[in-house]
Amino acid sequence: REETKVVHLGDERSAAGCLSQLANKGVRTTKNELHNKLLSTKKGVFMELQIIAFYFFADELLKASHFYDDLQSKTTNAEIITATLTAAQFFYGNQRTAANFLKTHHYIPNFVSESRFNRRLHRIPHVIWEKLFSTLSEYFKRNHSSNEYIVDSFPVPVCDNIRIFRAKIFSGKHYRGYIANKKRYFFGLRVHLIATINQEPVECIFTPGAEK
């Protein structure tokens, strides 16, 4: 059977063990069919390194913000953020698919259930997410040599039109916007985004749906 050196975030309780394994040139493990397909391409290798970078970036950010894990938690806050960033980078924002991928491929084998993941995700303070976005945007700006940027906006509906009068998250006519390309109204927020030509976000503003 063919073997290869594969590093997993989940070989210990968190990704902390991954760095030491990486320094020791990895652990010798047998390929399974799915992981073979993943690591056989340059994209797969990049994805693996990116997931590791996500974890250590999140872990250092949380430490700097003095936001610590509950000692009884089997999944760390850094792993919750890693799953969120992985979803945004590789799975079109689908957090369920990203979580299943990280658990199936043993990056985070003790990943929490979907409902608990949502609760843990929303328990992370907004200031952490603001620091995360600010740090990434400054990095993207420094490494962006062109003066060209992309400006766009997109809607984030909080409910279907038929449920507008029962909506509790937002209220008011200024949250009722219009999607021109779909020729339909929505109720919620509108995100205005400035990104580099490499699709790296550098500025982001949330406004009520009616504002353009």
Image (tube, grey):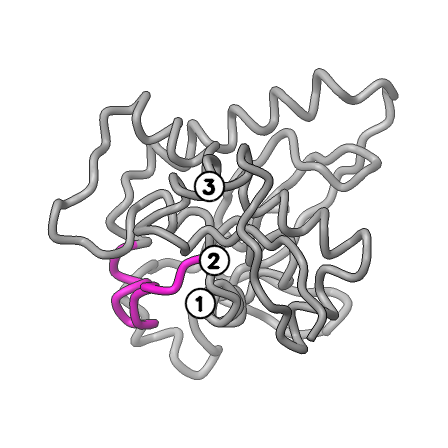
User: In front: 38, or 22?
Assistant: 22
Asked where in the image residue 130 lies, by quadrant, the reply is top left
Secondary structure at numbered mark 3: helix
User: In front: 123, or 42?
Assistant: 42
Identify residue for label 3: 55
Q: Residues within 10 Å of mark 1 (few under 14, many from 20)?
A: some
Identify residue for label 2: 107
Number of marks: 3
**Dividing the image into 4 quarters, which one contains the N terminus?**
bottom right
In this rendering, would 55 be left or right of 210? left
Asked where in the image residue 70 lies, by quadrant, the reply is top left
Q: Residue at x 69, y 26 (%)?
A: 140
Figure check: 54 above or below 178: above
In this rendering, would 89 be left or right of 56? right
Q: Mark 2 against mark 3, which lies toward the viewer?
A: 2
For marks 2 and 3 on the same chain, the one whose residue lies earlier in the sequence: 3
Task: Say what amino acid the circle numbered 3 marks.
Answer: Tyr
* Residues in magenta, as a range: 108-120
Q: Residue at x 78, y 54 (%)?
A: 43
Q: Look at the numbered discs 2 and 1 and tell me whether their residues touch, using CB distance below 8 Å.
A: yes
Secondary structure at numbered mark 1: helix
Task: Say what amino acid the circle numbered 2 marks.
Answer: Tyr
Which residue is most to the bottom? 162
Residue 103's label in the rendered image is 1
Task: Say what amino acid the circle numbered 1 marks.
Answer: Lys
Q: Residues within 10 Å of mark 3 (few under 14, many from 20)?
A: many
Residue 50 percent across, percent down from the top left: 62, 43
Secondary structure at numbered mark 2: loop
Q: Residue at x 38, y 49 (%)?
A: 79
Residue 108 percent across, percent down from the top left: 41, 59
